[in-house]
Image (cartoon, grey):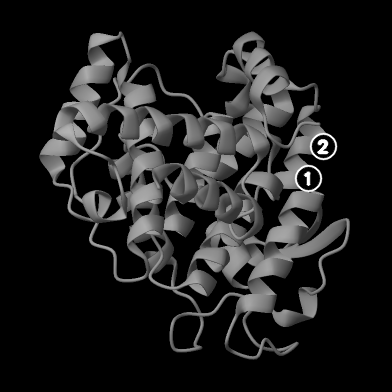
Amino acid sequence: MVDVLIRDWDAHLAHEKRRSDHTRRAYIATAERFCGFLAHHRGGAVDARMLKGLTPNDLRSYLADRRADGLGNASAARELSALRSFLRFVGGSNASVPQMRGPRVKKGLPRPVAPAEAMQIAQDVEDNAREAWVGARDFALLLLLYGAGLRIGEALSLTGAALPLGETLRVTGKRGKTRIVPILPAVAAAVARYAAACPWPVGKDAPLFVGARGGPLQPGVVRASVRQARRALGLPERTTPHALRHSFATHLLAGGADLRSLQELLGHASLASTQIYTAVDAAHLLDVYRSAHPRAG
């Protein structure tokens, strides 16, 4: 029975959530480990009824067992996020998922949000949305910040006239200055998915990103969703929507972009504002970018 649930969840992740093969493999492996643990911990066959009746203590016991195998805080937070997603799927739209704070990830030197963390945040925000279209909206918005380096205000000022997104997008930034930014296919696809799911008409002069009642989406709503996700994932407080823009800049600089080009992409009025990114350990970021950036290929 549980094998069928996991298989159905895998299909849901692939077709409804459009998760990458890498993410799906990691999520499915976590669910299989968890169900194997429950069979011994609860002493019975694992089925939907058992999964719907779990408590925070069950999750704590599982994580304690994993820690005994040497699992670190960051990996534990990722597994907890995967399990929440699995239990929400099993429970359906009215699922009551056991709540517990994710393990605290030790803070190090100031640095941009890592690629894996950026995608975790976007996926967790989508998974926890009260409605599917709201999740698609927030996922698309966060990908715009991370994949195109937009400020949150710039993304929220877009109108339906931007649709369908092409290879570039004209953005109006501070002091009314406009710039052209490249749009990755994955970002365009996420925005198109949101636009198709949005229950409100997205007119050419209307806001592209709308709130639950069809009005302009407020930045505080997005910040609150990211704040909830980073706490659940055990990520540091520096993980904010604006930090995704910083990550865009540092990854490009580490990948060889020159400061003048980066200045144009970010919409900085002066080069001095862009030069702050040179303080980041470029060698380390280059390794991260090449090995892990989900949009580098």
Going 64% across and 65% down the picture, which residue do you hit?
175
Q: Say if residue 266 shows up in the picture.
A: yes
**Position of residue 40 in the picture relative to residue 146 (left or right):** left
Disc 2 designates what residue? 261
- Is the residue 108 above or below the residue 37 in the image? above
Residue at 57% x, 51% y is: 13
x then y, percent, for residue 93: 36, 70
Give residue 154's quadrant in the image.
bottom right
- Hey, what amino acid is under mark 1? Glu
Say which of 237 and 260 sits in front.
237
- Residue visible at 53% across and 80% down? 210
As displayed, is residue 218 above or below residue 232?
below
**At which x and y percent is residue 204?**
75, 87
Can you say which quadrant of the picture contains the C terminus? top right
Name the mark on residue 243: none
* Residue that extends furthest to the right in the rendered view of this protein: 167
State left or right for residue 83 relative to residue 184.
Answer: left
Which residue is identified by label 1? 264
Which residue type does callout 2 highlight?
Answer: Ser
